Amino acid sequence: MAANDKQISGEHYKSPIQCWDFIASNKLDFFQGSAIKYITRFRTKGGRRDLEKAVHFLEKLIELEYGGDK
């Protein structure tokens, strides 16, 4: 059975395009993928908190790509 054919938990991951397929297809790193995950599920799971988590991952990505100082 393919991983996409089963759902371990949470209906918030059900969508026409699985988030992990988008992440893998676009060769996104951990920080990019995590931000995408939280953005795509915020309406069905964590609301504002998930958007804040996405921002946090993006802040870390900015630090890694451009250094700690703004």
Image (cartoon, rainbow, N blue to C red):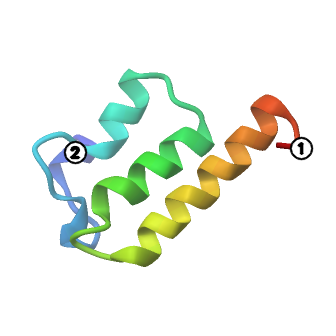
Q: Quadrant of residue 29?
A: top right
Circles 1 and 2: CB distance less than 8 Å? no
Q: Is residue 7 above or below residue 33?
A: below
Q: Quadrant of residue 51?
A: bottom left
Q: Which mark is in front, 1 or 2?
A: 1
Q: Is residue 33 above or below residue 14?
A: above
Q: Left or right of 59: which side holds 6?
A: left
Q: Which residue is mark 2?
A: 4
Residue 53, given in percent of the width and then of the height, sits at 54, 66
In the orientation shown, which residue stands out farthest toward the top?
26
Residue 70, given in percent of the width and then of the height, sits at 82, 43
Residue depicted at 24% across the width and 60% down the height: 13
Task: Pick whichever, 3 or 53, lies toward us.
Answer: 53
Q: Amino acid at mark 1?
A: Asp
Task: Pick whichever, 18 or 6, lies toward us.
Answer: 18
Q: Which residue is mark 1?
A: 69
Q: Left or right of 27: which side holds 69?
A: right
Task: Pick whichever, 34 or 4, lies toward us.
Answer: 34
- Earlier-in-chain disc, 1 versus 2: 2
Q: Is residue 22 above or below residue 39?
A: above
Q: Left or right of 22: which side holds 17?
A: left
Residue 18, given in percent of the width and then of the height, sits at 24, 44
Secondary element under disc 1, as helix, strand or loop, is loop
- The CA span between labels 1 and 2 is 40 Å
Q: Quadrant of the N terminus?
A: top left
